[in-house]
Amino acid sequence: MQRFINKVALITGAGSGIGRATAVRLAAEGARLMLVDRNEDGLRQTLEQLPAGSDARSMLVDVADEAAVQDCVEQTIAAFGQLDVLCNNAGIAGGDYSTVQDQSLETWQKIIGVNLYGVMLFSKYASRQMEKQGGGAIVNTASVAGIRSGAGGNAYSASKAGVINFTMTSACDLGGLNIRVNAVCPGLVETGMTKPVFDYARANNKEAKLGARCELRRFGRPEEIAAAIAFLASDDASYITGQALAVDGGNTASLNLPG
Ligand code: NAD
């Protein structure tokens, strides 16, 4: 499939995990890429993993910094002349599992700053360019944590629920401009973010348990999330907007009652 020939895609959080897999997938399908992260070494590794002949650049950007985001979109347009696809994928989990009674405001500000402000800021500046071009596609990486409790701390879960609602809201704002906005909600996937979970499980012989709650009885791979992102970003999804697609091995399909 070559669904992104003559298209330019900007991917945030492209220096690791799901963002890296999305970069590889979109480049394999012909996209020219602007790869964004705050991790320089991660970006370099992603560039090295792209198919030979890929046309890609990278930029160090903190997605929560409005001036940096605006500059990044401007530099993308200066470099490639267009911007057709935005993958708002950068995110942090924070590792804070405090209950609401002990929760610090600092954790909320940090996590919501990256996971939610970052999505809004890139959507703001990228959609202005997409409007000039007559349309575009935005795919936000939310999480099953935004649908159900129990998959992250309360700040992370609230931020991802916010991403799901912002996906619907911005789809309504931008639908009349022929800009589609959708989200993927991954279940558990082995990436930099979840490395401590996998390391702990392996050290304690509990790896099988990590996938046990999914109906497919396994955790996901970054490439499987990237495939769903690529679908939603492509013209194959031309009549889909405002949706949040769980890519979770059936995790959210079941109540998983004991017994
Ligand atoms: P990851 O840690 O491997 O990759 C996230 C990338 O985002 C990193 O390269 C990191 O440097 C970058 N990043 C973080 N904060 C940034 C900032 N302020 N500015 C720019 N870049 C920043 O994790 P991942 O699992 O690939 O995460 C990608 C997305 O998937 C995240 O939004 C995450 O919440 C979501 N997600 C992951 C899982 C999972 O199980 N791994 C499940 C559900 C949702």
Image (cartoon, rainbow, N blue to C red):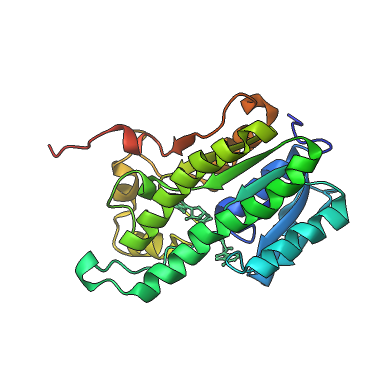
Residue 210 x, y percent position in the rendering: 33, 50
Q: Residue at x 41, y 45 (%)?
A: 187
Q: Residue at x 41, y 39 (%)?
A: 248
Q: Nearer the viewer, residue 122 or 89?
A: 122
Residue 226 x, y percent position in the rendering: 59, 42
Q: Residue at x 61, y 69 (%)?
A: 65
* Quadrant location of the C terminus in the rendered image: top left
Q: Is residue 216 above or below residue 160?
A: above
Whether residue 163 is visible, yes or no, is yes
Q: Residue at x 79, y 42 (%)?
A: 132
In this rendering, position of residue 229 left or right of residue 156: right
In this rendering, position of residue 9 left or right of residue 88: right
Q: Is residue 178 above or below residue 188?
A: above
Residue 34 x, y percent position in the rendering: 75, 55
Q: Nearer the viewer, residue 16 or 244?
A: 244
In this rendering, position of residue 15 left or right of residue 7: left
Q: Nearer the viewer, residue 117 or 52?
A: 117
In this rendering, position of residue 169 left or right of residue 73: left
Q: Is residue 204 above or below residue 183?
A: below
* Quadrant location of the N terminus in the rendered image: top right
Residue 102 x, y percent position in the rendering: 23, 73
Whether residue 44 is visible, yes or no, is no
State which quadrant residue 2 falls in: top right
Question: What is the residue that sits farthest to the left in this orientation?
Answer: 259
* Number of numbered markers: 0
